[in-house]
Amino acid sequence: MPDNQKMSVDELEQFANQLSERVDDEVESEVPHWNRAAAFEQCFHEQEAKDSLFSWRWWQMPTMSAAFSLAMVALVLSWSNASPTDADLTAMIHQQVNEQVEKRLAVEVNAQVEQLVSLRLREYAAEQQVVLANYRADIYKSQQSNNLELASYILTASREERKDDMTDFISFINAQRKDEQLAQKIKFQQLEREIGFQKVNLKATEHDGYPLSPSSKNTEKQQPLNEDI
C-alpha cells in the first residue's frame, strides 16, 4: 500500500509537470476585431421588425383567453355527472360566454367599419375637391379667353357699332355668369349626393353584405335634378 500511494503521488506530479509544459508552450493570440455595436443593432432591428409584423395578431389575446377559459369551465361542467341545477348553471355560463364574445366582436367590427367608412369618405372628398378645383380653373381660363376676344373685337369695331356691341357684351357676360352659377350649383349638388350615397353604400355593405344597385343611384341623382330645374 505505501508503494502504491507513492506511485500515485508520482503520477500526479508528472501529470502536473506535463500540464505546466503545455501551458508554457501555448502561444497567446489576440482577439479578432469586430463591430459589436453593429451586431447588437442588427439583432435589435430584426426583433423590432418581427414584433411590428406580428403584434397585430396578439392584441385580442386577453379577450380570447378569457373566452376560452369560460368555455373550458362550461365544457368541464357539461361533461361531469351534474344534477339538473348544475346543467342549468352550465347552460347559463355557456350563454354568458357567447354573449360576451359576440359583444366584443361586434364592438371591434363596428370600430373597424367606422374607420374604413371615414377613410373612404375622406379619400372621396379629396378627389372631388381636386376635380372641382380643375373645373374652376378651366372655367376661369375659358372665361378670360372669351372676354379677351370680345374686348379685342369691341376695340377694333367702329364707334357706331360699339354701343350695340357693348350692350350685347354686357348681356353675354350676365348670361354667362348665370350659366356658370347654375353649373357650379349643379356640380356642388352632385358632389353632396355622391358623398351621401358613398356613405349609405358603405353602411349598407356593412349591414346587408351588398352595395346599392346602380339603378337606385341614378334614381337618386335624377330626382334632385328635376326638382332644381
Image (tube, rainbow, N blue to C red):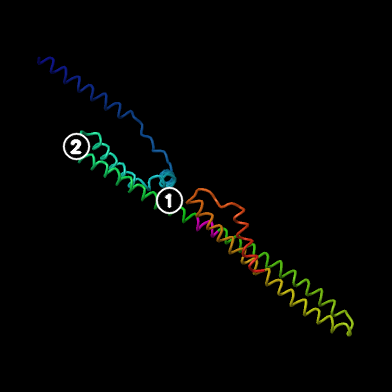
Q: Which residue is mark 1?
A: 109
Tags 2 and 1 in contact by the CB under 8 Å rule?
no
Q: Residues within 10 Å of mark 2 (few under 14, many from 20)?
A: few
Decide if residue 102 is on the left or right side of residue 193. left
Q: Which residue is mark 2?
A: 83
For the question of whether residue 144 can be seen, the reply is yes
The kind of residue on which mark 1 rests is Val
Q: Is residue 7 above or below residue 212?
A: above
Q: Is residue 118 magenta?
A: yes
Per the rendered image, the range of residues in magenta is 117-122
- Seen from the viewer's position, the closer of residues 85 and 95 is 85
Residue at position x 77%, y 71% in the image:
145
Q: Is residue 98 magenta?
A: no
For the C terminus, which image quadrant? bottom right
Mark 2 or mark 1: name the one nearer the start of the chain: 2
- Seen from the viewer's position, the closer of residues 49 and 167 is 167
For the question of whether residue 38 can be seen, the reply is no
The kind of residue on which mark 2 rests is Ser
Residue at position x 50%, y 48% in the image:
209
Q: Secondary structure at mark 1?
A: helix
Q: CA distance from mark 2 to mark 1?
A: 39 Å
Q: Is residue 170 above or below residue 114?
A: below
Decide if residue 35 is on the left or right side of residue 66. right
